[in-house]
Image (spheres, rainbow, N blue to C red):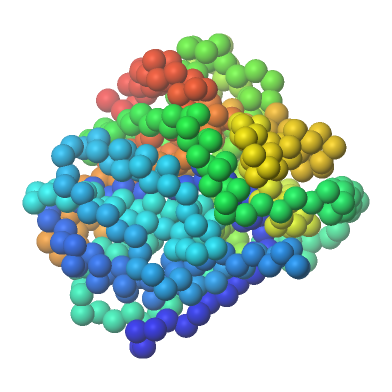
């Protein structure tokens, strides 16, 4: 195979543009490794995986004349790679926070960065990526490929995994119901109203918004790290009680929130759960690196009159019923009727009021966020008012080899950028038989003192099932 990979180009046809100018739409995967990981071995492996996964080289092409956005995999520069001497197990978060405060240059790319925390006995490989090109599963497939090529340096890159644009299988031949027509008409009207007062934003605008956001908000993470024996005990007890691990962990934090904060009120009772839809698409996705996820949303209120496991069972049944609910795909497809310029402006409608108008440039952002006649601003206000109080991302127990030559994977951490709109933002991953849960939050929304109380209370609920 030629060292020069073919340029890949794909039009965005779903809701990816909503992440374009998002101030906190990054995913971080931390792979803790026993053994010394050399810089040269890592660089050689990165050169191989960028051939295998074209979106790693992507920049975003914005066509204002047609209101379209494209992935173009012709970013020429090397991947940003920082190497830092490893000092502690908690150092990874310092590095992630450092990266969060540096905006990606969307039209230049690449939209991914790597950090190696290096020591002789133990290292962490951190992958920091913009959500517009990936989901959580993709980052783990990528980490697996990186370690595979480090362990097998002479193995060529035989397969290039081009991520396809997709349509959910269930909707390919589905009947058009009257409700579908009404929803589509609603979005068509919104789009026409947007065309009358469209505002176009660019990288310079984003840099201003990004700085204002990170000057105001402090992103924090608390971890619950289970050793192998407790992870195994948790799985065994969940199976024995006919509940899922995801349901038990989710319910523990919902119960803890109820005890500490008095429970969610109104629309905040809704829970959002991202769903992997790789096996539900009209084209084979395989291990491609890309964004293949939908979200189910449902109302769940912890019932203190029922047992903890009883609540967990109810939660699991709700998730199960929602995952098979066809409406999730119909909403996703209806959102396609909104243009990329509309979807990408949502961040400015949400946070633009933080911008202090000091000159004509800043005035543009502030004025837009205050324009109640603009349909994007009006709709964003409604969306934010209906944000779920809880978001739960669970990767499950991944088929991720433990050994790669002389290197051994010890544990992983998945961190998701927090938002002041979400109270409980959980990310869960099990690798090498060890479960790690991260509780991601914004200090200005809920204090660290309160979050520690929620974490401690959740652990109390879990004490019987983890041993």
Locate residue 53, reporting x and y percent: 43, 70
Q: Nearer the viewer, residue 176 or 274?
A: 274
Residue ID at (18%, 37%) = 88
Quarter of the image with the C terminus in it: top left
Residue ID at (81%, 34%) = 372
Residue farthest toward the left in the current orientation of the protein: 120
Residue 312 lies, with reference to residue 196, above or below; the image says above
451 left or right, relative to 359: left
Q: How many marks?
A: 0
Residue 428 visible to an observer of this rendering: yes
Q: Quadrant of residue 147?
A: bottom left
Residue ID at (38%, 35%) = 438
Residue 23 visible to an observer of this rendering: no
34 left or right, relative to 459: left
Residue farthest toward the bottom in the current orientation of the protein: 2
Locate residue 155, reporting x and y percent: 25, 79
Residue ID at (50%, 64%) = 108
415 left or right, relative to 276: left
Locate residue 128, reporting x and y percent: 39, 51
Locate residue 140, reporting x and y percent: 38, 56
Q: Nearer the viewer, residue 200 or 334?
A: 200
185 left or right, relative to 210: right
Q: Nearer the viewer, residue 434 or 193?
A: 193
Quarter of the image with the N terminus in it: bottom left
């Amino acid at each position: 195979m030629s060292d020069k990979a073919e340029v890949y180009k794909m039009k965005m046809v779903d809701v990816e543009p909503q992440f374009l100018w998002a101030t906190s739409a990054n995913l971080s995967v931390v792979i803790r490794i026993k053994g010394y990981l050399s810089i040269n071995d890592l660089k050689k492996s990165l050169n191989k995986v960028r051939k295998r996964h074209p979106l790693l080289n992507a920049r975003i092409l914005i066509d204002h004349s047609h209101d379209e956005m494209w992935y173009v995999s012709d970013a020429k520069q090397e991947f940003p790679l920082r190497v830092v001497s490893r000092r502690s197990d908690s150092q990874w978060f310092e590095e992630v926070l450092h990266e969060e405060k540096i905006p990606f240059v969307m039209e230049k790319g690449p939209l991914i960065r790597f950090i190696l925390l290096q020591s002789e006995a133990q290292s962490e490989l951190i992958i920091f990526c913009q959500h517009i090109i990936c989901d959580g599963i993709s980052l783990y497939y990528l980490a697996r490929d990186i370690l595979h090529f480090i362990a097998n340096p002479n193995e060529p890159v035989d397969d290039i995994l081009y991520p396809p644009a997709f349509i959910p299988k269930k909707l390919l031949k589905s009947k058009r119901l009257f409700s579908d027509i009404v929803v589509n008409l609603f979005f068509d009207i919104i789009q026409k109203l947007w065309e009358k007062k469209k505002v176009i934003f660019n990288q310079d605008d984003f840099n201003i918004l990004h700085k204002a956001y990170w000057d105001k908000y402090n992103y924090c993470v608390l971890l619950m790290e289970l050793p192998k024996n407790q992870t195994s005990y948790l799985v065994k007890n969940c199976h024995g009680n006919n509940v899922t691990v995801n349901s038990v962990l989710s319910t523990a934090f919902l119960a803890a929130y109820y005890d500490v904060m008095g429970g969610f009120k109104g629309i905040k009772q809704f829970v959002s759960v991202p769903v992997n839809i790789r096996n539900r698409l009209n084209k084979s996705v395989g291990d491609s690196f890309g964004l293949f996820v939908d979200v189910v949303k449902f109302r769940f209120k912890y019932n203190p009159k029922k047992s903890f496991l009883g609540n967990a069972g109810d939660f699991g049944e709700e998730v199960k019923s929602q995952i098979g609910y066809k409406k999730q795909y119909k909403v996703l497809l209806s959102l396609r009727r909104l243009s990329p310029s509309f979807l990408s402006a949502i961040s400015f409608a949400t946070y633009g009021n933080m911008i202090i108008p000091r000159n004509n440039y800043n005035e543009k952002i502030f004025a837009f966020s205050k324009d109640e006649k603009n349909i994007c601003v009006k709709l964003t206000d409604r969306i934010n008012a209906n944000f779920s109080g809880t978001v739960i991302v669970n990767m499950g127990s991944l088929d991720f080899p433990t050994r790669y030559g002389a290197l051994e994977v010890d544990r992983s951490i998945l961190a998701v950028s927090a938002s002041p709109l979400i109270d409980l933002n959980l990310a869960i991953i099990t690798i090498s038989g060890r479960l790690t849960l991260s509780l991601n939050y914004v200090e200005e929304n809920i204090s660290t003192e309160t979050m520690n109380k929620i974490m401690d209370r959740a652990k109390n609920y879990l004490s019987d099932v983890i041993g």
